[in-house]
């Protein structure tokens, strides 16, 4: 199995897990409220449900553009520093381990617990553009808090050796994060109840992701990331 295939699978799973991070999950009610307001007639109308879902797609496009751009910039930086890529991998692996220890709770990095709440909404008369902009604004609020996971993906973009690989990782991460939001757009009536019921899962997911970050960071530091290709065949996704 190609190592890059494994990285794409991990990026996708990291996006799914990021949805359950405290900073993202705490903003979901605002997202649901925004989408609910797009359908003036409520959820009973099939037309209104379609309007809600398409605005959810626009919202997802907004934050995806930001995260993909981050990875493109990381890839460009990696190309500029291509001659020292071995050291970049070791530095990146060390930083990823620090991020993992933060997520587990061995110590806390205050900056990585910071998020920007979205207190105002863009003009809804702008239609789907307003939903795209909301996605961009929300991603600005998430970025510091999901920094450990996003930094992990960007580290692989820096060491990927091409803009295409960095873009692909950004798309995979964004797709994983997008799926729960699109499901929420399809059924906003039950999502809030479900989130309250399983809110304790957030901490478990955070610890699991922290352990995974530590493992990946150590392997990246040692130059042995190909070990994952041998022992985690389920995250290839055929890519």
Image (cartoon, rainbow, N blue to C red):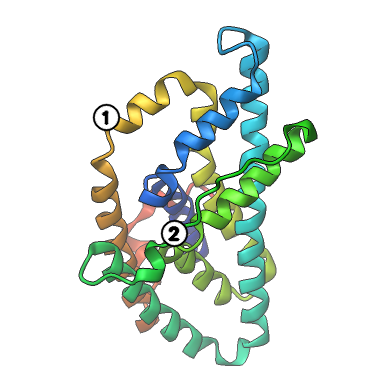
Q: Is residue 94 above or below residue 47?
A: below
Q: Report the residue marked by disc 1.
A: 197
Question: Which residue ends up furthest to the front in the rendered image?
Answer: 119
Q: Can you give x and y, in whole percent of width and height, for residue 119 in the image?
A: 55, 45
Front residue of 142 and 46: 142
Front residue of 39 and 238: 39
Q: Is residue 207 left or right of residue 12?
A: left
| Residue 188, numbered circle | none
Question: Which residue ends up furthest to the right in the rendered image?
Answer: 126
Question: Which residue ends up furthest to the left in the rendered image?
Answer: 106
- Secondary structure type for disc 2: loop
Q: Is residue 146 above or below residue 47?
A: below
Mark positioned earlier in the residue sequence (2 or 1): 2
Q: Is residue 202 left or right of residue 11?
A: left
- Secondary structure type for disc 1: helix
Q: Can you give x and y, in whole percent of width and height, for residue 62 in the image?
A: 66, 47
Badge 2: residue crowd in 10 Å (few <14, some 14–19, many ≥20): many
Q: Is residue 70 above or below residue 37?
A: below
Q: Can you give x and y, in whole percent of width and height, for residue 45 in the image?
A: 62, 7
Q: CA distance from mark 2 to mark 1?
A: 23 Å
Front residue of 178 and 47: 47
Question: Which residue shows up at 34% across the image and 56% down it?
Answer: 232
Q: Is residue 40 left or right of residue 88?
A: right
Badge 1: residue crowd in 10 Å (few <14, some 14–19, many ≥20): few
Question: Which residue shows up at 61% across the image and 43% down it?
Answer: 120
How many numbered discs, if any?
2
Q: Can you give x and y, in whole percent of width and height, for residue 61 in the image?
A: 66, 44
Q: Report the residue marked by disc 2.
A: 146
Question: Which residue shows up at 74% across the image and 34% down it?
Answer: 128
Image quarter for residue 148?
Answer: bottom left
Q: Is residue 166 above or below residue 192?
A: below
Image quarter for residue 124?
Answer: top right
């Amino acid at each position: 199995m190609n190592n890059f295939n494994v990285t794409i699978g991990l990026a996708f799973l990291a996006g799914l897990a990021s949805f359950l991070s405290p900073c993202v999950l705490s903003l979901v009610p605002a997202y649901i409220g925004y989408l609910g307001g797009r359908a003036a007639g409520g959820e009973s109308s099939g037309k209104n449900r379609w309007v809600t879902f398409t605005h959810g797609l626009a919202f997802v496009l907004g934050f995806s553009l930001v995260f993909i751009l981050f990875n493109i910039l990381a890839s460009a930086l990696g190309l500029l520093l291509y001659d020292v890529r071995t050291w970049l991998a070791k530095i990146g692996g060390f930083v990823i381990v620090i991020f993992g220890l933060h997520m587990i709770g061995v110590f806390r990095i205050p900056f990585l617990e910071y998020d920007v709440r979205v207190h105002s909404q863009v003009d809804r008369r702008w239609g789907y553009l307003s939903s795209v902009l909301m996605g961009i604004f929300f991603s600005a609020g998430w970025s510091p808090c999901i920094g450990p996971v996003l930094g992990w993906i960007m580290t692989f973009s820096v060491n990927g050796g091409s803009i295409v690989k960095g873009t692909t990782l950004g798309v995979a991460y964004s797709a994983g994060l997008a799926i729960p939001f699109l499901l929420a757009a399809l059924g906003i009536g039950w999502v809030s109840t479900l989130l309250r019921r399983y809110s304790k899962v957030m901490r478990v997911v955070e610890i699991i992701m922290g352990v995974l970050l530590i493992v990946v960071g150590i392997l990246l530091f040692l130059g042995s990331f190909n070990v994952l290709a041998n022992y985690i065949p389920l995250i290839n996704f055929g890519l």
